[in-house]
Amino acid sequence: MAREQKPTGWPDFARGVAGGVILGLPLIYTQEVWLHGATLSPRIILLLLAGTFGLNLALSKFVGFEGGRTFRPFEDATVGFGASILMATGLALLLRRIDGSMSFGNILGIISLSSIPISLGFALGNALAPAGGGQGAREMKGGAGDLLAAAAGAVVLSLNIAPTEEPVLLAYQLGIWHLGTIVVVSLALSFLIVFHAEFGDVQGRSETPGAIHTPGVETLLAYLVAFAVAGGLLASFGEIQGLDGPSLAEVVVLAFPASMGAALGRLLV
Amino acid sequence: MTKSNKTKTGPLRQRTAFEWAILVISVAAIATIGVGLVLYSVQFEKRSAEIEISIEPAIGENSFILSVENRGGTTAEDVVIEVARGDLTQLVEFRAIPKAGQEEATFYLEGTGAPTASLVTFKEP
């Protein structure tokens, strides 16, 4: 007997958004993407996009949205790819990698290159964190376990960015409003990934008693952990010397990918 | 002959408003990028790099901002500009100036009079 098909909803879509942000952010923090997005021939970029769409199509056959529609893999790949373009646009604007002074073609190039890893992350969102948590997750439940997982995830995602020039460069180029928006987006996306994207033990997490398991408090604490990890890594690599404004800006910039790693880490427990 | 009203995973169902909305928005985003890149390719790709140089005073004595604009349709790589002030000269290098893009660099050059700049070399990919 065929199972009843439920429609694709916001939690399914949010799962894709989460996967896209987690896998796409490290590349968004890469100067070569900013440069090659503007310098590569549009034909080469179109070829890269076509190849990526093919890969998305193949992935969507296995880990797409809910079934019950004609051309489901094609539709899922289209939605994933389109959403990734919009997400890449948002992230590029947030980090001021595109603005009105640039030529339209160069803006399209930067958005296109950035959307490639995001779209693959979108398609893989389903497989990133298994429902019910990973193996051994039960032993790590509780406030300290969650924060430990957050710290581990933050290190994993920010360690390959911390020693590079990009956090310093971005911090230098971003104003107070952009930095404030990055903090708000870091918190909002963490909240969305952990409590609204339907993967991991989302139901159990929302219902776990205790002050730290209030969604707002947990999100804030996990962000503070990510912030501390980002500051620690930047200090370890000699990128920040003290508690001045520029150093704080660098930590805010690196805390963005770190907080996404912290969210992923919490999903695995 | 009638087509079976089923998919491999079960019976067909109507798309919800949410599914239609994300599908339409996604198609629009893909079309914008695709059409934009094709148009940009047709319009600019065959034009070679066209470098224009300008110099403005920067904050601080003997400091200047060198602006290099590429008005062509091809990226200029390994761009080398010679700036001169009186008898003194200096080379300023840029890794790449994107097609229809602009890059800036600040340089310090002692001497008298207004500085001048000339293009030494660049490569096209």
Image (tube, rainbow, N blue to C red):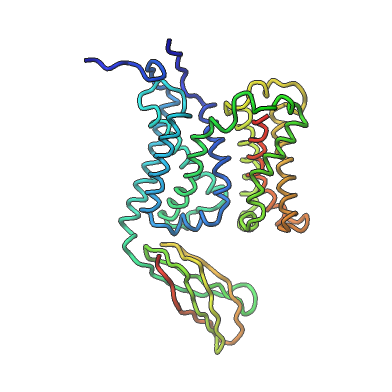
A160 sits to left or right of A140: left
Give me the residue at 62% from left, 80% from top: B62
Name which quarter of the figure residue B73 lies in: bottom left
Q: Nearer the viewer, residue A186 or B56?
A: A186
Residue A59 versus residue A75: which sits nearer the camera?
A: A59
Can you say whether A196 is above or below A247 in the image? above
| Vertical order, A113 against B14 (above or below) | below
Q: Position of residue A213 (x, y in %)?
A: 73, 26
Furthest residue in direction top, as rendered: A1
Lateral position of residue A108 relative to residue A203, left or right: left
Q: Please provide percent x and percent y for residue B24.
A: 39, 33
Q: What is the quadrant of the C terminus of chain A in the image?
A: top right
Residue A150 point in image, percent of width and height? 70, 37
Viewer-closest of B28 and B121: B121
Q: Is residue A170 left or right of residue A145?
A: left
Task: Kindly give the residue lying farthest to the bottom in the view shown.
Answer: B87
Image check: B112 left or right of B20? right
Residue A80 drawn above or below residue B116: above
Count of marks, rendered view: 0
Residue A182: x %, y % from top left = 62, 45
- For image coordinates 50% across by 58% down, the residue present is A35
Q: Quadrant of the N terminus of chain A?
A: top left
Q: Residue at x 53, y 48 (%)?
A: A93
Write down the quadrant of residue A206 in the picture.
top right
Which residue, as the protein is rendered here, is positioned at the far left?
B1
